[in-house]
Each structure stands twice: as C-alpha cells, then as structure tokens.
Image (spheres, grey):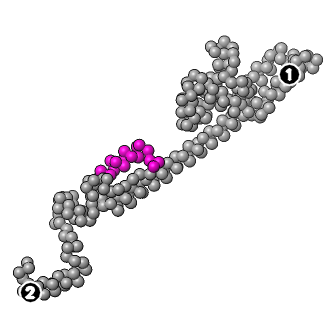
Amino acid sequence: MIQKFDTPEALAKSYIALEKRFGVPGDRLLTLPDKPLDEDPAAYADIFKRLGAVEKAEDYGLQLPETSTDADKAIFSSLSGVLVENKILPAQAKALISWWAAEGERRAEQDKAFVAELDRSNTDALKKEFGAAYDPTMKAIDNVLEKYFGKETRDFMDAAQLKNDPKFARGFAKLIEAMAEPGTPGAGASPDPASDVLSPTRAKGELNRLAGDKEFNAKLFNKSHPEHKWAVQRRSQLTAWAEGREV
C-alpha cells in the first residue's frame, strides 16, 4: 500500500486528506464485519474491546445499595454475568443497574405503604367490631400467643401483620372466650384480667341470657334487693359494650 506513494510528503498529504474526509485519524476508525453480530460474534470482539467492553463483572465497578437483600444480590450477580457475556458497555451497565436498584427501592416503598394501609384498615375494622373490648382483646391475644406459642411466634405475627387480621382476631377472640367458659380445659382465670371486657357480640349474648335469668331479674327489678344497684350497673355496662361504647 505504501509503495504507491513516491515520497514521504505524498504519504503525509494522503493521511491528512483521509483525516479530513472521515474527521478522525485512521487508527480511530472501526470497520464493521460483513455478517451481523448474531451470525459471527467473534468478528466483533475487537470492536467491543475498543469500545470498552469488560471481561469480568468486577470490572464494571458496580455496587448495590446497602439496603439490598440477599435476593437482590443474587439477581445482581447473575445479571452482571449476562451483561459481560453480551458485551454491554460500562456506561450502559451502570445506567441499567441504577434503574433496577431505584425500581427495587420504589417497589419496596410501595409494599411498605400497602402494608401500613392494610394494618390501618384492619385495625379500624376491628375497633369498630370489638368496640371497647378492642384493646383488652388484642392484649389477651398477645398473652395467649406468647404463653402457648412462644414470644418468637408472637413477634412474627406482629411483624407479618397477621395478629390484627380480622379473621385471625375473630377466631382467637372466640378461642379466648371458650377458654374462659366453665367446663373448658384450662378455664377459670381468663388469659388477661382486662379481657373481662366483652366484645359487642358477646355482650349482646350476655344481655339475652340475663333477660331470661329469673335470679338476675329479681335483683334488677326489685329496688329493695341488696344487689339491685349491681344488677342495674351490670345491665348498663353490657348495653354499653353491646353498642361498642367504653364504660
């Protein structure tokens, strides 16, 4: 090729003309192979190398946020290998990983907000259903969980927002009531003294029972009975609980 130039000056002029034509020195020009990348990937090896493609994932110098989970790290490790294998350039890899990490944080915040809203909704529903018995009932559930299942299980139920799930709380409230009924194994003392406050449903049931209790009615309607005042207070108390009011 060089033999076609008679003098060094002619060679230099040709090189300068080449730069003017292409805008860059000849050593910065890349020639695309005849075949597409998917048909002859080896032919593109030098091109990717000159563009800055890395040979190992570590060469990207990418790091995940400190809040990343073990699952995030496993996916990141696998994804980094795919990036290297497909000759993804460092700038592109950085943009992709940054987007992925930000998307993960965004979804985590969404999940956190969803759980908080679910917890609020469940709590409001149970407070409306249990009325004045809400706090003592939830405390009694705590005590039963810790006593019979252990503190670790109780803490797990709290963390997983399961304890105030309406279906779970209703079921446990019925279990606690059953534990306090005469003739039930372990009955006698309720799981917690405060659990003597009745839920609206149970208070209504007790009012219905007392309505047919001759002994109680004798105390209630006979003002001269020594326990008349107690009977009136008991009926008022049950009525308040049945309506979800505090006493």
Residue 15 is situated, as x and y percent measured from the top left of the image, at 17, 82
Name the residue carrying label 2: 7
Q: Secondary structure at mark 2?
A: loop
Magenta span includes 74: yes
Residue 9 is situated, as x and y percent measured from the top left of the image, at 13, 87
Residue shown at 57%/22% (left/top)?
148
Q: Residue furthest front?
A: 8
Q: Between 187 and 2, which is closer to the camera in this rendering?
A: 2
Residue 162 is situated, as x and y percent measured from the top left of the image, at 56, 34
- Decide: marks 2, 1 in contact (CB < 8 A)? no
Q: CA distance from mark 2 to mark 1?
A: 125 Å
Name the amino acid type tagged 2. Answer: Thr
Please give left or right for residue 160 compared with residue 137 in the image. left
Quadrant position of residue 193: top right
Name the amino acid type tagged 1. Answer: Trp
Residue shown at 45%/49% (left/top)?
66
125, above or below 239, in the image: below
5, above or below 178, in the image: below
Residue 167: tell me if it is visible. Answer: no
Magenta portion: prevailing SS class: helix
Residue shown at 66%/27% (left/top)?
140
Name the residue carrying label 1: 230
Residue 31 is situated, as x and y percent measured from the top left of the image, at 19, 70
Q: Which residues are magenta?
A: 66-82
Quadrant position of residue 13: bottom left
State the count of labels.
Answer: 2
Q: Between 66 and 174, which is closer to the camera in this rendering?
A: 66
Quarter of the picture holding the N terminus: bottom left
